[in-house]
Amino acid sequence: MKIVMLGAPGAGKGTQAKMIAQKYGIPHISTGDIFRANIKDGTKLGMEAKQYMDQGLLVPDELTVRILLDRVSNEDCKDGYVLDGFPRTIPQAEVLDEALVKLGDKIDFAINVDVPDENIIKRMSGRRACPGCGATYHTEHIPPKTEGICDVCGAALVLRDDDRPETVKNRLEVYYAQTQPLIAFYTEKGVMRTVDGTVPMEDVFAAITKILA
Ligand code: AP5
Ligand code: MG
């Protein structure tokens, strides 16, 4: 099963994608996570991506597409995957589509996690991420057992560099201009589904599993 997660920054794509990956035994592929891992390791790719990410801008398509196509050609992707944060522009979606057509394949579902802007700002300021294992928390909605410490690996939690309010505003603008048009793209392909992302994460997940069942 090949799934694309859509939704504004902070809508809960990553949270749901991790749950889907676990339940269906397929890899969770987040281009944002790939870039952040490269930034942490100080790679050339990470340095390049950081210039864009810190401003809330998209990393150029050419670079992002190359990384994604390389990742999905791995052996662990043969039974499917859940993409989180890719595609993010129409050209990215078209490249992915062409690559899949060549393999006689296609995206089965695009799931839009729908959350209004007011909620988004609150979610981002409360988000805490684990730099060690990638787990995500929210100070109010999904707090760790011990404040500031990851439940899974014990590392100190951090605020993402691009979760500062001024950058969040830019990310939302970029989302409406460049990513939201993907809803029409996947609607035309007949695979678009929308879930209410404002309800508790277990309820969002229940709505998604109903669609995938
Ligand atoms: P990326 O990492 O993809 O960030 P994003 O799309 O801005 O999305 P987020 O990760 O911020 O949010 P999310 O929807 O995953 O929400 P989460 O589950 O964490 O991209 C970062 C940057 O990388 C981009 O700006 C760009 O520069 C670059 N990039 C990445 N991919 C690219 C591409 N394809 N092309 C070009 N550039 C690219 O949840 C948010 C918070 O809410 C958490 O605290 C969570 O615990 C909480 N929460 C989740 N669900 C619920 C719920 N139901 N109720 C209450 N709280 C909830
Ligand atoms: Mg995410």
Image (spheres, grey):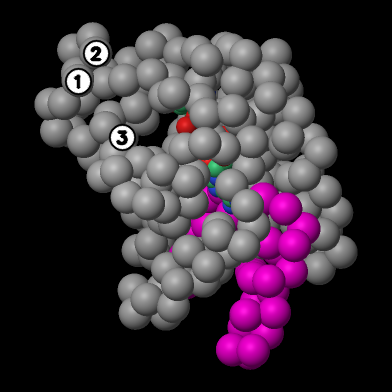
Front residue of 52 and 68? 52
Q: Earlier in the sequence, mark 2 or mark 1?
A: 2
Residue at 38% across / 19% down in the picture? 159
The residue that label 3 is drawn on is 135
The residue that label 1 is drawn on is 156
Residue 87 forms part of the magenta stretch = yes
The Cα–Cα distance between marks 2 and 1, rounded to whole angstroms, is: 6 Å
Question: x, y (%) of residue 102?
Answer: 64, 89
Question: x, y (%) of residue 150?
Answer: 21, 25
Q: Earlier in the sequence, mark 1 or mark 3?
A: 3
For label 2, the crowd category at 10 Å Cα-Cα, with few meaning under 14, some 14 to 19 and many 20 or more, is some
In the displayed structure image, the side of residue 35 where residue 55 appears, left or right: right
The residue that label 2 is drawn on is 148
Residue at 85% across / 54% down in the picture? 184
Report the amino acid beneath label 3.
Answer: Ala
For label 1, the crowd category at 10 Å Cα-Cα, with few meaning under 14, some 14 to 19 and many 20 or more, is some
Q: Earlier in the sequence, mark 3 or mark 2?
A: 3
Residue 83 forms part of the magenta stretch = yes
Q: Are marks 1 and 3 in contact (CB under 8 Å)?
A: no
Report the amino acid beneath label 1.
Answer: Ala
> Within the image, what quadrant is residue 39 found in?
top left
The residue stretch that appears in magenta: 79-108
Report the amino acid beneath label 2.
Answer: Gly
The answer to whether 44 is drawn above or below residue 96 in the figure is above
For label 3, the crowd category at 10 Å Cα-Cα, with few meaning under 14, some 14 to 19 and many 20 or more, is some
| Disc marking residue 21 | none
Label 3: element kind: loop
